[in-house]
Amino acid sequence: MADRPNQKFRFEPLDKAKHNRAAFFCEHERLNIYLKEQANQDINKRVAAVYVLTPDGKVIAGYYTLSQYSIDAGELPHEVTRRFHVPRYDKLPATLLGRLARSKEFKGAGLGEILLMGALKKALEHSRNIASFVIVVDAKDDKAKDFYKDFGFMDLPGHPNRLFIPMQTVEQLFPEGALNATAGHQSEHE
């Protein structure tokens, strides 16, 4: 379970030939089904990029998905548009953090935070090549909503479980050197 001291984890793009999707179980059945039945189709159709957190290249301790997205500029709170000098466009480019799940086997090991930080870092890296003003997430429940808010996500008015975080805020979490050192997303976490 969570008693895996000094175990190192790394992020990798999901590879159906090497990652054991069948053994992955989290608390939300829809996230289990997605990984086992839909994720590879989404990768092949370029609908989502799926990254797994693994200790050994086979076991999936958790995963997340990222996709391109857009958001109506008018939906952002006024204080955000003013603070971040939002251009007057109808739509703004965004990144959707579509799914984030941690295996029950690793509950209590702090992997939720590692998964989220990995997703934010990957989204930030990609925003340097394909513009993204915010990262958007739809929280499954109030517990998930509180989790995201602990990391700076804010409510998107008019959408009860949708939250966002400006990319400029994400950028402050990762010094430039940290991004360059982890290019390729092969960073290890203990």
Image (spheres, rainbow, N blue to C red):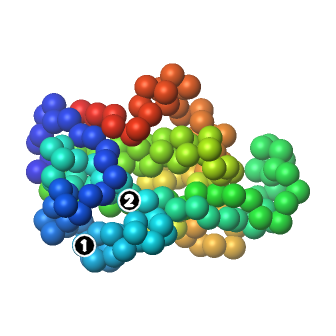
State which quadrant residue 69 falls in: bottom right
Residue 130: % across, % down: 63, 50
Whether residue 150 can be seen here: yes
25, above or below 5, in the image? below
**SS at mark 1?**
helix
Q: Residues within 10 Å of mark 1 (few under 14, many from 20)?
A: some
100, above or below 165, in the image? below
Q: Amino acid at mark 2?
A: Val
Does 90 sit left or right of 182 as displayed? Answer: right
39, above or below 87, in the image? below
Does 125 sit left or right of 60 as displayed? Answer: right
State which quadrant residue 51 falls in: bottom left
Picture residue at 33% right of the left edge, 37% below the top? 186
171, above or below 95, in the image? above
Q: Which residue does the numbered mark 2 point to in the structure image?
A: 50
Q: Amino acid at mark 1?
A: Lys
Whether residue 141 can be seen here: no
Q: Quadrant of the C terminus?
A: top left
**SS at mark 2?**
strand
Residue 98: which disc?
none
What is the spatial separation of the Cα atoms under label 2 and label 1, in whole angstroms? 12 Å
The answer to whether mark 2 and mark 1 are in CB contact below 8 A is no
Residue 146: % across, % down: 47, 57
Residue 87: % across, % down: 85, 51
Picture residue at 33% right of the left edge, 69% below the top? 40
Q: Which residue does the numbered mark 1 point to in the structure image?
A: 36
Closer to the camera in the image, 148 or 61: 61
Looking at the image, is mark 2 or mark 1 earlier in the sequence? 1
Picture residue at 20% right of the left edge, 65% below the top? 21
Does 130 sit left or right of 99 as displayed? Answer: right
In the picture as drawn, the residue positioned furthest to the right comes out as 88
